[in-house]
């Protein structure tokens, strides 16, 4: 048996409370294991039974998910006394092994050394990971305010709306004048589309259109509007059942941030010197990069000095800032830019500060990889799901990958976290940091719709980047941040694709099966690039079937259930780049 492939730790990704009653235990093994068992019971049950030594009851585990090199086994139970002690037995090839904490040994031979069992010590209600319930019901829409809609009048300092210009230096200047009142005016459009969550990139004073180098966290950029405009936007959105999430840039600031300006002027004499990571007396502010390490920044960008989020004053400053957003503007969520570089100390304190103000505030981290250390219930509620983004894009780009390869890759994403976190992972197929998906698809709207069908039917909460609903194209960094063509939209130029995307969004919101973490794949050896999966929901009799044809040939797929969405599905055949969603 492949012993090095066997892994279990009593950590939140493999041993957790799904709710106040249900414990979930996962075991990872090699693919050579034929069956896994858990031997478990209350850690003190032998006292109750007047037995000298503890002994658990043996239960078969479910083969939950298949990975490329591993199997994930799962056992669900409702411990009477809210605690569990356990170890495992695995069998395969005529061999049986016992798996303890830090020790694997043969099951057929008594072992005289100490065997340490694993433990779920107590299912404390306050320790159960509980993202806000509303989040898994949400379809997000990401807006870069400068490029979405302009309500203000003519201004010679602004670029004419929609005119393409490539900046000499990405991010600086390049204002088109989109504003908060413009967004408010388009809320009926967003409601018709079907989204019920808005995520805004930064809105605070800066000298760049993207505003990720913040100058003043207390002041909305005047080009965007006022606090009253923001309050009106949130209030109108809430009236339409739409939540609002702001982008918080706390890893770094801009060079005109009051504390950095004082440090730049006074050096070590500044009372804010320790708010930053400074390693040299000469800051050399005329040099753009910080490769020499004279002070730390976001990446090596000299105009984005890194904030010391370990410092108590920095923590308190930003706790007060966020409290203002929640208390006075009634925002529903905060997305944390460069969320893996902010200190855990800061995040825990911020959560403790904000939850009493709004107990269902949503805290989302921008992290591009396995993020379990931030998702144990005391920091973020969710993260941006870049692993799943890569999974979908890799399948699109690498034509040699099969549906089995996709399943292995996606299952690896789904088993990173407890199920309640998986249900609220922030899924997307493009953002302001990526090539637009329509560009990736070469302008092929059928292929675009296929990827969107996957986005809205895979586990997690989907987010649509503004303009993707009309197949807006663009490469990274500037071309992917073009203006919304409202004149063409109002003329009906995009009504066809808008209607299809809206249908997908409403399906995601209407079908409870699509809001769970449950997914099962089936494969067709004759059509290796035909993706077929089923979404189910506890307590629901019906299931949702999804078929995506990424191959070169049409596939016969007769279905007996009601068709919910179809593109390139003709006479019972799913054509290349087609997508089909139906009831089972």
Image (cartoon, rainbow, N blue to C red):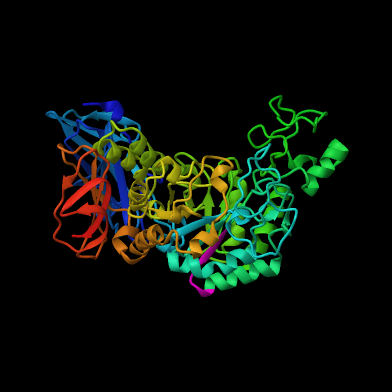
Q: Where is residue 152 in the image (x, y as percent from the top left)?
A: 68, 64
Q: Residue at 27% across / 49% down in the picture?
A: 578
Q: Can residue 213 be seen in this view?
A: yes
In the image, residue 176 above or below residue 182: above
Residue 514 percent location from the top left of the image: 32, 58
Toward which corner of the image does residue 333 lie, by quadrant?
bottom right
Where residue 340 appears, as percent x and y from the top left, is: 55, 41
Left or right: 524, with 173 as reference point:
left
Determine which quarter of the picture holds residue 244: bottom right
Work out whether residue 98 or residue 14 is closer to the camera in this orientation and state it: 14
What's drawn in magenta, residue-wise?
A: 239-245
Quadrant housing the N terminus = top left
Say if 84 sits above or below 236 in the image.
above
Q: Does the magenta stretch include residue 444?
A: no
Decide if residue 14 is in sight here: no
Which residue is nearer to you in this view: 257 or 159?
A: 159
Which residue lies at the image location 51% right of the left edge and 59% below the top edge?
488
């Amino acid at each position: 048996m492949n012993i090095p492939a066997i892994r279990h730790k009593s950590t939140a990704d493999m041993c957790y409370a799904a709710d106040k009653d249900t414990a979930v235990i996962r075991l990872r093994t090699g693919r050579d294991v034929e069956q896994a068992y858990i031997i478990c019971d209350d850690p003190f049950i032998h006292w109750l039974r007047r037995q000298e030594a503890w002994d658990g009851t043996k239960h078969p585990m479910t083969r939950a998910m298949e990975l490329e090199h591993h199997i994930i086994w799962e056992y669900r139970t409702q411990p009477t006394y809210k605690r569990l002690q356990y170890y495992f037995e695995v069998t395969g090839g005529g061999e049986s092994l016992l798996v303890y904490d830090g020790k694997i040994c043969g099951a057929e031979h008594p072992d005289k050394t100490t065997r340490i069992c694993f433990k779920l010590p107590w299912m404390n209600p306050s320790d159960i990971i509980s993202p806000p319930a509303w989040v898994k019901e949400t379809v997000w829409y990401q807006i870069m305010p400068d490029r979405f809609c302009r309500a203000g009048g003519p201004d010679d300092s602004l670029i004419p709306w929609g005119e393409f210009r490539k900046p000499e230096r990405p991010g600086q200047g390049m204002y088109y004048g989109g504003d908060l009142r413009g967004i408010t005016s388009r809320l009926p459009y967003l409601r018709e589309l079907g989204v019920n969550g808005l995520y805004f990139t930064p809105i605070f004073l800066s000298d760049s259109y993207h505003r990720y180098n913040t100058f003043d966290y207390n002041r909305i950029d005047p080009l965007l509007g006022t606090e009253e405009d923001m309050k009106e936007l949130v209030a109108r959105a809430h009236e339409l059942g739409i939540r609002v999430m702001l982008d918080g840039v706390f890893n770094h600031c801009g060079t005109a941030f009051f504390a950095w300006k004082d440090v730049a002027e006074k050096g070590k004499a500044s009372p804010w010197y320790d708010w930053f990571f400074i390693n040299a007396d000469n800051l050399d502010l005329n040099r753009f990069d910080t490769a020499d390490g004279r002070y730390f920044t976001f990446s090596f960008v000299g105009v984005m000095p890194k904030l010391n989020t370990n410092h108590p004053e920095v923590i308190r400053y930003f706790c007060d800032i966020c409290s203002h957003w929640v208390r006075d503007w009634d925002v529903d969520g905060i997305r944390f830019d460069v969320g893996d570089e902010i200190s855990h100390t800061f995040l825990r304190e911020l959560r403790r500060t904000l939850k009493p103000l709004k107990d269902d505030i949503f805290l989302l981290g921008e992290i591009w990889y396995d993020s379990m250390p931030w998702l144990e219930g005391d920091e973020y509620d969710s993260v941006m799901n870049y692993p799943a983004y890569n999974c979908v894009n890799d399948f699109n780009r690498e034509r040699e990958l099969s549906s089995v390869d996709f399943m292995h890759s996606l299952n690896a994403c789904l088993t990173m976290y407890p199920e309640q976190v998986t249900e609220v992972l922030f899924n997307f197929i493009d953002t302001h940091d990526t090539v637009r998906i329509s560009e990736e698809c070469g302008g092929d709207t059928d292929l675009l719709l296929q990827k969107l069908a996957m986005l809205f039917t895979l586990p997690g909460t989907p987010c649509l980047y503004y303009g993707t609903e009309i197949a807006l194209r663009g490469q990274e960094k500037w071309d992917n941040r073009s203006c919304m063509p409202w004149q063409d939209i109002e003329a009906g130029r995009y009504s066809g694709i808008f209607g299809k995307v809206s249908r997908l969004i409403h399906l995601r919101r209407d079908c409870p099966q699509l809001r769970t973490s449950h997914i099962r794949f089936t494969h067709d050896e004759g059509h290796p690039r035909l993706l077929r999966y089923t979404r189910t929901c506890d307590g629901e009799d019906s299931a949702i079937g999804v078929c995506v044809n990424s191959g070169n040939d049409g596939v016969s797929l007769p279905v007996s259930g009601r068709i919910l969405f179809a593109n390139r599905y003709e006479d019972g055949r799913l054509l290349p780049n087609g997508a089909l969603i139906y009831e089972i």
